[in-house]
Image: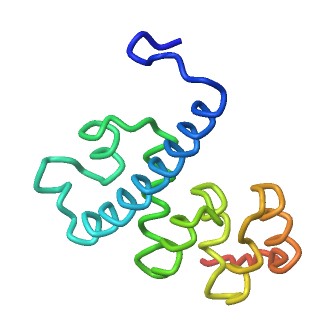
């Protein structure tokens, strides 16, 4: 148990965990929205970073997966602002958003279909709706 926390009874602990999860989701949505703006303005270059990823890793001290998922979400949100609402209400998480976002232009109904699904369910949904197209190879002289 953390030394700075007083003992909570079972009900209070459950309520606190729910509150913290909601707070974390709100913070993540706000961070994604701001990263989208920061990326669009390319402000990380002014700070001496070659990429938004480098900025997030070094300046914001995010882990690799944290930085990648949030940057991927931020870039998707720039093209599909409705994704922020889905993140905010919890019907999409960063990992499911990352699976759905690249395919939203191909299938407009995919976003609603993916809501409240697990990562595996979203992967299966995308695979069923948008089967991979065979690669076209060309040989050039």
Q: Quadrant of residue 100?
A: bottom right
> Residue 31 versus residue 17: which sits nearer the camera?
17
Q: Residue at x 61, y 74 (%)?
A: 102
- 125 over 107 or under it: above or below: above
Instruction: Name, please, the residue furthest toward the right.
Output: 128
In the picture, measured across the screen, residue 45 lies left or right of residue 61, that is left
Q: Position of residue 64 (x, y in %)?
A: 47, 39
Which image quarter holds the C terminus? bottom right
- 83 over 44 or under it: above or below: below
Q: Residue at x 81, y 74 (%)?
A: 132
Q: Residue at x 71, y 87 (%)?
A: 107
Q: Position of residue 98 (x, y in %)?
A: 60, 62
In the picture, measured across the screen, residue 99 lies left or right of residue 126, that is left
Q: Residue at x 17, y 56 (%)?
A: 45
Is the image coloured rainbow, by chain, by secondary structure, or in one colour?
rainbow
- Give the number of callouts: 0
Q: Position of residue 80 (x, y in %)?
A: 49, 81
Q: Quadrant of residue 54?
A: top left
Q: Position of residue 20 (x, y in %)?
A: 49, 42
Q: Quadrant of residue 130?
A: bottom right
In the picture, measured across the screen, residue 114 lies left or right of residue 35, that is right
> Residue 89 versus residue 45: which sits nearer the camera?
89
């Amino acid at each position: 148990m953390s030394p700075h926390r007083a003992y909570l009874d079972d009900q209070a602990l459950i309520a606190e965990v729910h509150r913290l999860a909601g707070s974390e989701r709100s913070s993540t949505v706000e961070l994604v929205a701001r990263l989208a703006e920061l990326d669009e303005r390319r402000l990380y270059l002014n700070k001496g970073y070659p990429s938004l990823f480098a900025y997030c890793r070094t300046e914001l001290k995010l882990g690799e997966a944290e930085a990648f998922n949030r940057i991927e979400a931020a870039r998707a949100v720039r093209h599909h602002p409705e994704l922020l609402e889905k993140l905010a209400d919890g019907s999409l998480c960063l990992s499911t958003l990352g699976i759905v976002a690249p395919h939203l232009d191909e299938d407009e109904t995919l976003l609603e279909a993916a809501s409240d699904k697990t990562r595996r369910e979203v992967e299966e949904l995308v695979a069923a709706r948008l089967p991979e197209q065979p690669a076209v190879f060309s040989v050039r002289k």
